[in-house]
Image (cartoon, helix red, strand yellow):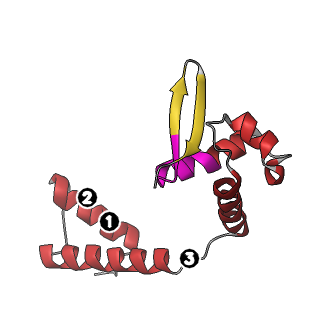
Amino acid sequence: MQKLTIANKFDEVVNFITGNGQVSMSQDEIVEFLLDRRAKSIKKAGTRKPTATQKENEVLKDVILEKMPSEPSTITDLIHSIEELNGFNTQKVSALVRQLVLAGKVKKEKEGKKTLFSLADW
C-alpha cells in the first residue's frame, strides 16, 4: 500500500463524510489527520508578521483617530482636513475608516445620500 498524500487524505475525508467511494483510513486516522492539519494551520497563522503596508495602515488609522474633526465628516472631508491623508484616494481612506468602524472606534451614520463618520463615544 502506498503512502497517502495530503490531497489523498482530504479525498478520504470527503469520501468518509459523503459516503461516496471507498475509504481506506479509519475514523480515528481521519480525526487525527484533521486535528493535525488544524494545529498546523493555527501555528502558521500565529507566526505571520504584518506586512509593511499593514504597518503603514496602522499608523494611518492612529492619525485618523487623533486628528478626526469633532463634527461628523465624509471621507472626502477627512482627506482634505487631515494633512497625512492628502494624496490618498477615497477608496484607501474609506477602507481604513471602515476598519475603525468595525473596531468600534469610529461611528458611521447616514444623512440622506451622505455617509458621515465621527469618533465613537468611549
Viewer-nearest residue: 94 or 38: 94
Q: Is residue 105 above or below residue 40?
A: above
- Cα gap from disc 3 to disc 2, whole angstroms: 29 Å
Does the magenta run of residues contain 30?
Answer: no
Q: Name the kind of residue labelled 1 in the image.
A: Phe
- Cα gap from disc 1 to disc 2, whole angstroms: 6 Å
Q: Is residue 46 above or below residue 105?
A: below
Magenta part of the chain: 96-107
Viewer-nearest residue: 43 or 82: 82
Question: Image check: 19 left or right of 1?
Answer: left
Callout 3: 10 Å neighbours few (<14), some, many (20+)?
A: few
Name the secondary structure under disc 3: loop
> Which residue is the site of mark 3?
48
Asked if labels 1 and 3 touch by Cβ distance under 8 angstroms, the answer is no
Q: Name the kind of residue labelled 2 in the image.
A: Val
Sequence-wise first label, 3 or 2: 2
Name the secondary structure under disc 1: helix
Sequence-wise first label, 3 or 1: 1
Query: What residue do we see at 33% from left, 80% from top?
Result: 2
> Which residue is the site of mark 1?
10
Q: Name the kind of residue labelled 3 in the image.
A: Arg
Nearer mark to the viewer, of 3 and 2: 3
Question: Image check: 64 left or right of 112?
Answer: right
Query: What residue do we see at 55% from left, 51% from top?
Result: 99
Callout 2: 10 Å neighbours few (<14), some, many (20+)?
A: some
Q: Position of residue 62 (x, y in %)?
A: 66, 61
> Which residue is the site of mark 2?
14
Q: Position of residue 8 (x, y in %)?
A: 35, 68
Asked if labels 2 and 1 touch by Cβ distance under 8 angstroms, the answer is yes
Residue 77 placement: quadrant: top right
Viewer-nearest residue: 100 or 6: 100
